Amino acid sequence: MRAAVRGAPAALLALAVCAAGAAFAADTAGAAAAGAAGSTAAQAGGEGARVYAQHCAVCHLPNAGGSPGFVPPLTGTLGHFASSEDGRALLAAIVSWGMTGAIRVGGRSYMGAMSIVRPLSDEEAAEVLNYVLRDHNQASLPADFAPFTAAEIQRHRARKASPGEVHAARQALARRLEAEGKAR
């Protein structure tokens, strides 16, 4: 318990830094989109890479590697979530509503909150999910992976959820995937 309390200020600081960075990125979207990082990402990976650079990279880092203990990586494990309808709904919910609570990814624990500073359009959400899945999770994608579409995101967004509800859904699905031998 003391370790969790001792680590709480650091986790809150990391969350504040991410939120401030995301707010800055959203506030300066017009200028930043023309900047070197946004342009380079857009040239390399299209619209999904641009959206990732503008909205996600400030916390999850440009390589999607995250920050151990604070921000989970988006590499190597998310493809398993794209293998079922409830997993696809979960991924759409995470980028739509955020998520709050402790999770384990790749054997490491992460305690934090993913806030949505500026909501993505349905098209942006589909593009960024496809970018992260294809570019950072190829090995874990199902062979029959179908890219997200704006219509699919819109359909999943019809069921609104709090960040805590998204966390509960993620935990239940992660347990199921682990039992099936698909999660790490």
Image (tube, rainbow, N blue to C red):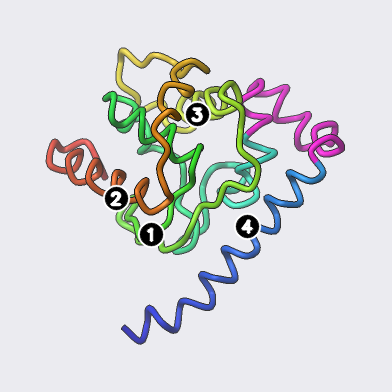
Residue at 62%, 57% (x, y): give it.
18
How far across and how far down the image is residue 172, in percent? 22, 45
CA distance separating discs 1 and 4 = 16 Å
CA distance separating discs 3 and 4 = 19 Å
- Point out the frontmost of discs 1 and 3: 1
How far across and how far down the image is residue 145, in percent? 36, 16
State the extent of the magenta-drawn residues as a range.
29-51
How far across and how far down the image is residue 180, in percent? 13, 36
> Circle 2: is it few (<14), some (14-19), or many (20+) Cα within 10 Å?
some
Question: Where is mark 4, residue-wise?
Answer: 18
Quarter placement of the C terminus: top left
Question: Residue 101, which numbered label?
Answer: 1
> Can you tell which quarter of the image residue 179 is in?
top left
Residue at 50%, 37% (x, y): give it.
96
CA distance separating discs 4 and 2 = 22 Å
Q: Is residue 3 above or below residue 162?
A: below
